[in-house]
Amino acid sequence: MQGIVVLYYLVALVAALILLNAYKRNTTIGSKIGKVMLATFLLVVFYSFNIVGTTFEVKSVALSLSFITMDIMMILFYEYILEFIGWKQKVPGIFSYCIYAYALVDTVFMLLNPYNNISLEFRRIPFGDDFVLGYVPKLPFIIHNIYIVAIVLFVVVLLVLKCGETPRVYWKRYYMLIVGVGAAVGVNVLNLNMTGIIPVDISSALYCVVGILMYYNTFHYLPAVTLNITRRMILNYLSEPVVLFDYEGRLADYSADILKLMPGVRFEVAVMTLEDFIREGEFKGFRNTEKDQEFEWTGKIAGENHIFQCKFKCMKDSRNRGIGKIFVFHDITAMRKAYFELEQSTLYDPLTGFYNKQSYMTQVPQWSDSRYWPVALGVCNVNGMRSLNDRYGSAYGDFVMKQLARCVRIHIGEDAFAAKVDNGDILVVMEGKTHEDAAAIFEAVKRDVEKFFEKDNPVQVEYGIAVKEREDVTMERVLSDARTSMQNKKMLRDNSASSSLVDSLKQTLSESDYETEEHVERTREMAARLGKAMNLSDSDIGKLELLAVLHDIGKVAIPHHVLVKKGKLNDEEFKIMQQHTIKGYRIAKSSPELGDIAECILSHHEKWDGTGYPNGLKGEEIPLLARIISAVDSHDVMVHNRPYHQAMPEEDAIKELRRCAGTQFDPHIVEVFTRLLEEEELPKVWAERERQKQEAEEAAREVAAKVLEKESEKKR
């Protein structure tokens, strides 16, 4: 008797060990195995009271509980089988509901049985020095036995059907369970009907054996069965990362190379699923687990990026049934590098890494599509690049270009198109960007480059912007406008090769006229501010600044005595003075760099009401930039001293501009200009007046203090 008790305790211990190990797996199927073994453990414990119990009541209650636990164990085993074979969705739910419903009924009968023997009667059977209880079955208990056998038969049918759709090599993991559970239930039924011959039930030990089979088949069978096959057929013949999954999508084997490629991933045979592997690898190009496919994937080996051509194959047997799935990774880094270098040489500029001119020309047609509008095109360049190369060498010039390209790349973002084209120009096309967006980007580029070089050899960058947002404006025109804008700005920079012409004209003008460099610079700065307030394009603002500097260039051909005369000009002298607009127009027309502003130079003394000269143009017949310069130049003359008049206060100048709106000046320009002056200039004027007033008061106090001090000394 003691030996039987020890056997039951050993069986309970084994069940507990399987239970703990299954739960440690932390998987759904591991949890189901754990529940089955928990029920087995309780079954063994309850039945052991039939041996070690001291009273009839204890033994009868324990046996009733063991029968209830057997129902629960079989239900849990059935749920495990559905998970194990992957048929949770295939088996109709009505089967499960019937199984659960009868288990509930049987539980009620078994709980009531110790009090009225409605399911079976217990009889004492001598066993050693004590007794155990035998059974006299009644109809409910017979149905209980049929219920247990029915579940087992249903499970066996499911396993047999699973074998029918499974390759033969995997059958063993299913029929081992069929044999194990069949033997356990058979012994249990035999014992229930032969208690006179076999007084104690030993089927619990067989249930524990079934638990061992469940654990083994779930977590260890696949590696043991497929190891030799995969290594012989695949792994030993490939020197590339390989991952093999079985027909159900669970990891079957893998090569050592995959561990180098994915060192942070836990490859556990029979636990990792195909979905787990795809999720861990983040295979963006992977599409369908049921179709053969190829895709590229980037991984790291020894800290370096490697590009792999990944092949995914669904392996099938002779009957076209899936027997597994395999990933093979082929390193194409060297091949891709060679292709990239070839592509670089044909599509990209080697110095900056941007596209070359030919690449830009192939892209131009797409921007004629209105879906991309507005399309902002910006061109930037380094002022005086030739002089930098001559002074510091071409290597330094290349370094400057690379730094410019780096700053451009930082600020334009991933979606913008950038190319290095003729004369060292870097061209950027930005879809969906307005003029303001593009200007902000290129201002940031300009600021960063000039700040980078400000300590050693100062470098200046200039840019031009134009925007396509209409069908009738071609990309060629947009590029031309952007370049013109950039060149106009370059002509106003001291170190630009383009500035020599402007510098010489400015010098000639200053020598022949009373206009000062301060006046020219103030007019240029104010014209640019007004142009921005009027939302002019970058190209027009560049022309406006150039016009502000050179609008009076025709005065170099006017006799000096007429220019410097302090009094009022007579009619003949005034006619001579009027000729400076025509002479300026001719000078500008003779120079390709100034051709764009020639008409504005000719018209900058025209008046809104048509009383100006030389052509008596009226209203919007006068070029817009000429109208702007007329207002800006007149304002600067009014608020600063001249040989023939004293400066007037800013408030009076604003009133004068408004008084002349509609006669001399464009009313709209005056409205924008005066608002700008009131918002930005008047506060400066008032602050300066307040400062001067405070200084005067302080000086007066000092004088008064000195007078008082002298009077005090006289009295003493």
Image (cartoon, helix red, strand yellow):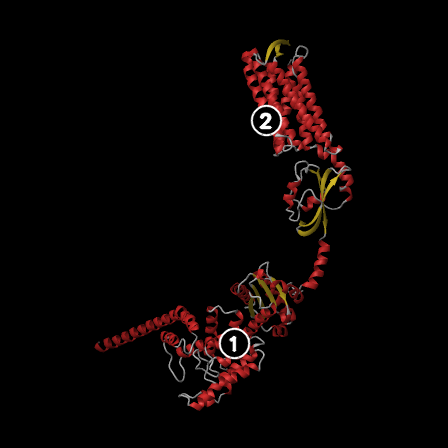
Measured from the top left, where is residue 77 in percent x and y?
63, 26
Q: Is residue 217 above or below residue 364?
A: above
Label 1: few (<14), some (14–19) or many (≥20) C-alpha neighbours in 10 Å: many
Q: Is residue 19 above or below residue 201?
A: below
Quadrant holding the C terminus: bottom left
Q: Left of 623 or right of it: where is 367?
A: right
**Figure quadrant of residue 449:** bottom right
What amino acid type is highlighted by mark number 1? Leu
Q: Residue 546 carries which label?
A: 1
Measured from the top left, where is residue 615 in percent x and y?
48, 83
What amino acid type is highlighted by mark number 2? Tyr
**Figure quadrant of residue 20:** top right
* First of labels 1, 2 by sequence position: 2
Looking at the picture, tell me which residue is in the foreground, 348 or 669: 669
Q: Do the residues labelled 1 and 2 touch (CB within 8 Å)?
A: no
Q: Is mark 2 on a helix, strand or loop?
A: helix
Alpha carbon separation for disc pair 1 and 2 = 90 Å
Q: Which residue is drawn at 75% across and 46% down?
A: 239
**Figure quadrant of residue 249:** top right
Q: Name the residue under label 2.
A: 97
Q: How many marks?
A: 2
Q: Is residue 600 visible?
A: yes
Furthest-left residue in this view: 715
Measured from the top left, where is residue 664 in percent x and y?
42, 78
Measured from the top left, where is residue 417 in percent x and y?
61, 62
Q: What element carries label 1?
A: helix
Q: Can residue 55 be seen in this view?
A: no
Quadrant holding the N terminus: top right
Label 2: few (<14), some (14–19) or many (≥20) C-alpha neighbours in 10 Å: few
Q: In this view, does 131 lie above or below 452?
A: above
Circle 1 or circle 2, nearest the eye: 2
